[in-house]
Image (spheres, grey):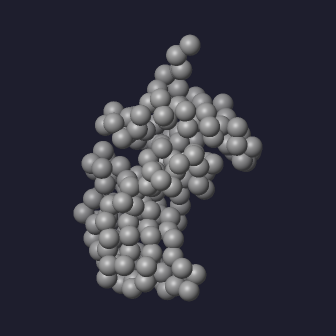
Amino acid sequence: MRDPVDRDRVVAFLEALGRSFHHPARILLSGGEGLVWRGLRGVTRDLDVAFEVDARWHGEWIRTLRDLIERTHTSVEEASPADFIPLPPGAAERAEFIGRFGSVEAFLYDPYSVALSKLSRGQSQDLEDVRSLLERGVLDRDELRRLFEAILPAYGERALRADPRRFRRSLDAVMGPPAA
């Protein structure tokens, strides 16, 4: 069992990563740790990350992450919203730079993509996370609904478990039904 992840643990992990990996790379925090980073939640159980690293250094990157997981007692999952939903238009441009740690640049994943993937999963904590993002002004309600509608056709064709009706129910549970 790994320790819960609070903001200090996120920073410590990124600092250790920057000291341990000596090639250019990008890491994107793509789950609940983004809410922890923004102060919207105290802890999460793991770091969900996506990354970009040159193929020459990929093996070293993976070994470094595995070593850090053990040394820091931090659970790290390779996961991003793109694993669960079609990414909405402009997702890459909405990633938020949070710092440089050695040669590693760290970003928060596009908050709309994170919110939409949480709505797709639809668990109570996910819906609460999306409410928090809306209440704190990280997300604009109209833009979230617009991006939801933009990905819905592709979402429905993505996989059998990708149920467009359940996805819409999650959105409506958080935001209410659309105005007529």
Could you tell me residue 87's position as x and y percent? 59, 49
User: Which residue does the image show at 27% across and 48% down from the upper left?
Assistant: 39
Q: Return the residue nearer the eye: 98 or 90.
A: 90
Q: Is residue 137 left or right of residue 115?
A: left
User: Which residue does the image show at 28% across and 66% down from the upper left?
Assistant: 11
Q: Is residue 147 left or right of residue 95?
A: right
Could you tell me residue 156's position as x and y percent? 71, 40
Q: Return the residue nearer the eye: 77 or 114.
A: 114
The quarter of the displayed image where residue 102 is located: bottom left
Q: Is residue 39 left or right of residue 94?
A: left
Identity of the residue furthest to the top in this view: 180
The quarter of the displayed image where residue 25 is located: bottom left
Residue 42 appears in the rendering: yes
The quarter in which the N terminus is drawn is bottom left
User: Which residue does the image show at 57% across and 46% down from the upper left?
Assistant: 89
Looking at the image, how many numbered discs can be counted on the residues?
Answer: 0
Could you tell me residue 131's position as x and y percent? 40, 34
